[in-house]
Image (tube, rainbow, N blue to C red):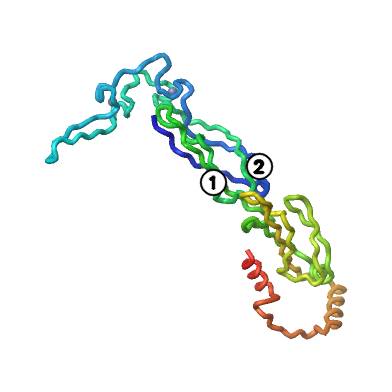
Amino acid sequence: MTRGQDALVRLDIDLGDAVFGGEKELTVDTAVACGTCHGDGRQPGTGARTCDVCEGRGEIRQVQRSFLGQVMTTRPCMTCQGFGEIITDPCYECSGDGRVRTRRTLTLKVPAGVDTGTRIQLAGEGEVGHGAGPAGDLYVEVAVRRHPVFQRRGDDLHATIEVPMTAAALGATLSMDTFDGPRELDIKRGAQSGDTITLRQLGVTHLRGGGRGDVVVHTMVQTPTKLDAEQEELLRRLATARGEERPEGRVANPTEGTLFGKLRDAFKAR
Ligand SMILES: [Zn+2]
Ligand SMILES: [Zn+2]
């Protein structure tokens, strides 16, 4: 009897399953004990005869003479594969192997907080061993699918929201869907591209317990690209009022205030 091998399967889940955890059905294809012979490989009601090669020991002993004297070596008997007996009538179902490959469905509890590459171990759900040996373990490797809105960084979820130029200048309240339902986003007066709004504790549940990550929303200010005559006139009047008809390209300080600076700070803060 030998212990079966471990098996590895991949499970694709949605980001929402990683946020909250959940139950997933998993189809696995592994060797299980044959139901007809219950793993011993014999057609039911038939016996086995003692292996005449190894005389039932399951191993072959060889005595070799060397300058050290007699050396005895043993190796497994290939005729009976180490079982010491030979099945006279192999099971029709499994051809005497004691195992059959079957596809079965398991229900797996996916813990909240898993990420791509996380392995979940299911003891005894791997391949059954030869001669009805104990089964190995099954490892389920998680792969989290890409989400159209949220990008995961650690347990934080990042998203980008487009804000019209006028709303960015005047301030606004927008609604955004999260995994916990819609939430209000407070766009402050004078919001800039790259500003972030943090919604605390709406991210991925920490795998080891103790709260959740955050949702971090990055604002992206939308400059209008199509202006009708009236809108263009309004904007020109605004430019005049602000003394911006002939703006000077002022070089921004790369360490502060710019989109790149803010993005870099956001990465640094991780
Ligand atoms: Zn069988
Ligand atoms: Zn043998």
Q: Say whether residue 222 is left or right of residue 120.
A: right
Residue 29 makes an appearance in the image: no
Q: Say whether residue 49 is left or right of residue 147.
A: left
Question: From the viewer's perspective, is residue 52 above or below residue 168?
Answer: above
Question: From the viewer's perspective, is residue 16 above or below residue 188?
Answer: above
* Residue plotted at (74% across, 53% down): 178
Q: Is mark 1 within 8 Å of ligand 1?
A: no
Question: From the viewer's perspective, is residue 86 above or below residue 157?
Answer: above
Assign a secondary structure to mark 1.
strand
Q: CA distance from mark 2 to mark 1?
A: 15 Å
Q: Which mark is residue 83?
A: none
Residue 144 image offset from top left, x and y in percent: 60, 50
* Nearer the observer, 59 or 167: 59
Quadrant in which residue 94 is drawn: top left
- Residue where numbered disc 2 is placed: 22
Residue 4 image offset from top left, x and y in percent: 43, 34
Assign a secondary structure to mark 2.
strand
Residue 62 image offset from top left, x and y in percent: 20, 32
Q: Which mark is residue 119?
A: 1
Residue 89 image offset from top left, x and y in percent: 37, 18
Q: Quadrant of the N terminus?
A: top left
Q: Is the C-beta separation of discs 2 and 1 under 8 Å? A: no
Three-letter code for the amino acid on which mark 1 is drawn:
Arg
* Residue plotted at (57% across, 51% down): 116
